[in-house]
Amino acid sequence: MDYPEAQEELNMVRQVTRSSRADMLDVRPLRIIMQAREVQVLQRIASELPIDEHVLDYAVRLARSTRTWPGLNQGAGPRASIALV
């Protein structure tokens, strides 16, 4: 899957962040490429993959570094560390 063009991505971010509900996005243009069960199988497989401790450490350090960076009022929380992995 390719990344959207910059303007498309900007519109997407704008639409989601201006809305209190992300499920308001227009999904009609999307086509189904796999069923929910297939996604669940892939999620299970991914959750069983080993993750090197260096990767985990880097994700935590990266998120934590935002908490003391002078350019931010509020840094990334633990969910950001998880999302990075």
Image: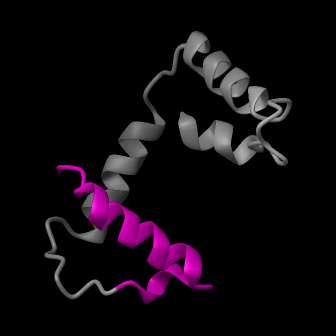
Q: Position of residue 32 (x, y in %)?
A: 16, 73
Q: Position of residue 11 (x, y in %)?
A: 37, 72
* Residue closer to the observer: 17 or 21: 17
Q: Main secondary structure of the magenta part?
A: helix
- Quadrant occupied by the C terminus: top right
In the rendered view, tell whether residue 57 sits above or below residue 2.
above
Residue lying furthest top in this view?
Answer: 54
Q: Residue at x 37, y 40 (%)?
A: 45
Q: Residue at x 57, y 81 (%)?
A: 18
Quadrant in the picture for residue 71: top right
Magenta stretch bounds: 1-25
- The mark tally for this picture is 0
Horizontal side, residue 35 vs residue 83: left or right: left
Horizontal side, residue 41 vs residue 23: left or right: left
Q: Residue at x 18, y 65 (%)?
A: 34
Horizontal side, residue 84 vs residue 8: left or right: right
Horizontal side, residue 62 vs residue 30: left or right: right
* Residue closer to the observer: 38 or 4: 4
Q: Position of residue 74 (x, y in %)?
A: 83, 48
In the rendered view, tell whether residue 30 sits above or below residue 59.
below
Q: Position of residue 72 (x, y in %)?
A: 78, 42
Q: Is residue 48 magenta?
A: no
* Residue closer to the observer: 70 or 64: 70
